[in-house]
Image (cartoon, coloured by chain):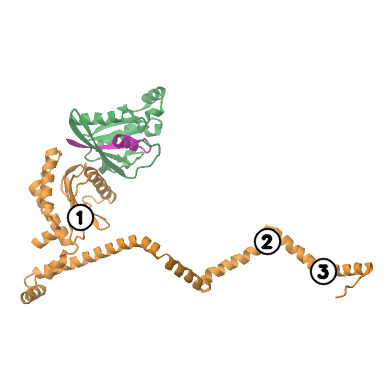
Chain colours: A green, B orange
Amino acid sequence: MISKKVILTGSFGVGKTSLFNKFIHDKFSDKYLTTIGVKVNKKSVSIDGQEVSLLLWDIAGEVSQEKVPTSFYLGSSAIIFVFDLTRPSTFNQIAANITYLKSISGDAVIKVVGNKHDLVDDDDVAKIKETIEIPWDILTSAKTGANVEGLFHGLAKEFLK
Amino acid sequence: MKMVQHSDEEEQLLKRLREIILRDDRAELNHLQDLINDPKQLATKVSPIITEHIEFLKQNFPTEFEQAVDKIVEQKIISSQDQIVNLIYPKLDIMIKKYVTSMFQKLKDSIDERLDDVKSTFSFGGIKARFASMFTGVKQSDVILTDIGAVVIEEIFIIQQESGLLVAVASKSKHADQDVIAGMLTAIKSFVEDAFDKGSEDLEMIRYENSKIFLQNFQSYYFAVSLTGSLSEVEKEKLSEELITFAKEDLPFNIKDITATLFEETSKKLDRRFFAENHTMENQKIES
């Protein structure tokens, strides 16, 4: 079994904690409770018979990633940058945020995730795709659970490569 | 009594007479009725009196009502003794525990000082203690005293510095969320060290009630030792020395990858060294 630290980051209210809770506990709540500081939890996933233990750090949302304590990112194997498909303000500065994350995270894998996919239709998604500075890796919905397992299993697979 | 009969003329005169005599009183009465029936007017008149009275009460409440209030409180206390005890007891319990622990800490620090003094061959304390021991046959009573409130190691974690991943763990009783504890401890440690911008300085201790977590930092990992009881400065040094020895003998200098083998072997070594022989810091101290 291998253990890896995975960071969930992004602006406030984009659904980081919802993704975290959906993946860890398979639960979703419409209630918005802001995360204070950081919340840590663990889940193991099995990839072709090999166990990968993911230690997830759900970091309190900040509009600018530079406001997050740098030490939180240290030693991470992956950073999941989450944005809200319904709020352009959460992906308007995406290029600057990703550049910053790359500069502080060494060789960590960075995944760009558009959440709340259940709240937008295909036309909206197409429009966002035209305007967004950096293409996303996956679109998820913490509410319906769409692609949540896929996101973390995909990461675990990359760790085993 | 004989009723006096008046003529109509007399009645009219009497009526007029009454009107003349009572005119002023009736006017006054009407004015008062208007005043009472109009809330605004009444408030204007009454408010200053009430305000004045409240002010008077504020200033003179103890003297005016002290006896009455005392009596009510006394009766309430007598009739609700059980409820009051139930309310106060948990807080008292914590306060007493804290006080006793703090007193033990002071006592143990002073005993440690005395023991250091006794160990010094040419000090007055050392000579005095040896004479006392020779004549009484009693071994250093200080050692017995230090048994009280012994420090007990509950759990030891070895955690990778930056990632917060668990390298190894040993404990008196198995906990389910040791990985999460390791992660959260690292998050707290990182936050405190960042927040106070102490550069190369590290967080050394986290305290909660009568328990504490002692942190010993190394290059790529750190130890987090969960303890109960009071930890004197001497014991802290002993624990630190023991952790350094363990790191030197049983851990690589730089832990990059945490494999299952590393986790299992190091956890076993930790368990053997700190728990297999019912290890306490007091034992260490006596042995030394």
SS at circle 1: strand
Depth check: give the residue in front, A93 or A138: A138
Residue kind at label 1, given as amino acid type: Leu
User: In terms of sequence position, does the residue under pointer 2 or pointer 1 come before the other?
Assistant: 2
Which stretch did the figure color magenta?
A: A1-27
Residue occupying the point 11% across, 61% down: B285
Residue A71 left/right relative to A142: left
Looking at the picture, how far across and down is residue B86, in whole percent? 36, 61
State yes or no: residue A6 in magenta: yes
Relative to B140, residue B239 above or below: above
SS at circle 3: helix
Instruction: Determine the CA span between mark 3 and mark 2.
Output: 25 Å
Looking at the picture, how far across and down is residue B229, in whole percent? 21, 59
The crowd level at tag 1 (other Cα within 10 Å; few <14, some 14-19, many 20+) is: many
Quarter the N terminus of chain B occupies: bottom right
| Number of the label disc, if any, that sits on residue B227 | 1
Q: Is residue B35 visible?
A: yes
| Number of the label disc, if any, that sits on residue B42 | 2
State yes or no: residue B25 in magenta: no
Residue kind at label 3, given as amino acid type: Leu
User: In terms of sequence position, does the residue under pointer 3 or pointer 1 come before the other?
Assistant: 3
